[in-house]
Amino acid sequence: MIIIFGQSAVRIARVGRSLIKPMTLIDLANPSKFLSPTARVLPWLVGLTAILLAIGLYQSATAPDDYQQGATVKILFIHVPNTWLSMFVWGVMSLAALGTLVWRHPLADVAAKAAPRSAPPSRSSRW
C-alpha cells in the first residue's frame, strides 16, 4: 500500500490499481455525484421521518394539560416547531436562489424551487 499526500486529501493506492480518492464535500456540488447517494438514502430517510413524526404527534397528543392554561397550550407543540422549520426553509431557499443567480448552479435551482412545498407550513405558522 502506497500513501500519496495530495493537495487536499490523502490518496491511498494499491500497487497495480488505480488511485482511490475519498469523496469530499465539494464533490457533492456535482449533480450526478449528489443525486446518486441521495437516491440510495432517500427511502430510508422518508421511513425514519414518518416514524419520528408519528412518535412526536403521539407524544404531543398525550402530553398532560398545563396547570394554568389547560389543553390550549398544546398548540405550541405544533406551532413553534412549524414556525422554526418554515423560517429555516425560506432561509435555505433564499441562499439557493442566490447561488442560482450568482453561480448558475443547477442544484441551487432545484433547492430554490422548494418554495411551494414550504409555503403551507409557513401559512399555518402565521395563525
Image (tube, rainbow, N blue to C red):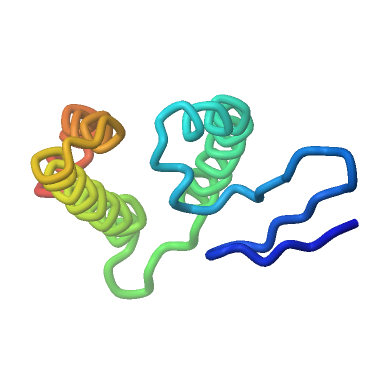
Left/right of residue 27 with respect to residue 111 in the rendered view? right
Point 80% across, 50% down: residue: 13
Number of numbered discs visible in the structure rendering: 0
Point 63% across, 32% down: residue: 44
- Viewer-closest of 89 and 10: 10
Q: Residue furthest front?
A: 16
Left/right of residue 1 with respect to residue 53 in the rendered view? right
Point 21% across, 31% down: residue: 109
Q: Position of residue 56 (x, y in %)?
A: 51, 49
Point 37% across, 74% down: residue: 67
Instruction: Tell me which corner region of the image, top left, top right, bottom left or bottom right, holds residue 12.
Output: bottom right
Q: Residue furthest bottom?
A: 68
Instruction: Tell me which corner region of the image, top left, top right, bottom left or bottom right, holds residue 47.
Output: top right
Q: Position of residue 85 (x, y in %)?
A: 29, 51
- 78 is higher (above) or lower (below) than 44: below
Instruction: Tell me which corner region of the image, top left, top right, bottom left or bottom right, holds residue 111.
Output: top left
Q: Position of residue 49 (x, y in %)?
A: 53, 38
- 54 is higher (above) or lower (below) than 62: above
Q: Position of residue 36 (x, y in %)?
A: 55, 27
Left/right of residue 56 with respect to residue 71 in the rendered view? right
- Viewer-closest of 37 and 125: 37
Task: Give the quadrant of the N terminus.
Answer: bottom right
- Viewer-closest of 127 and 123: 123
- Viewer-closest of 76 and 64: 76
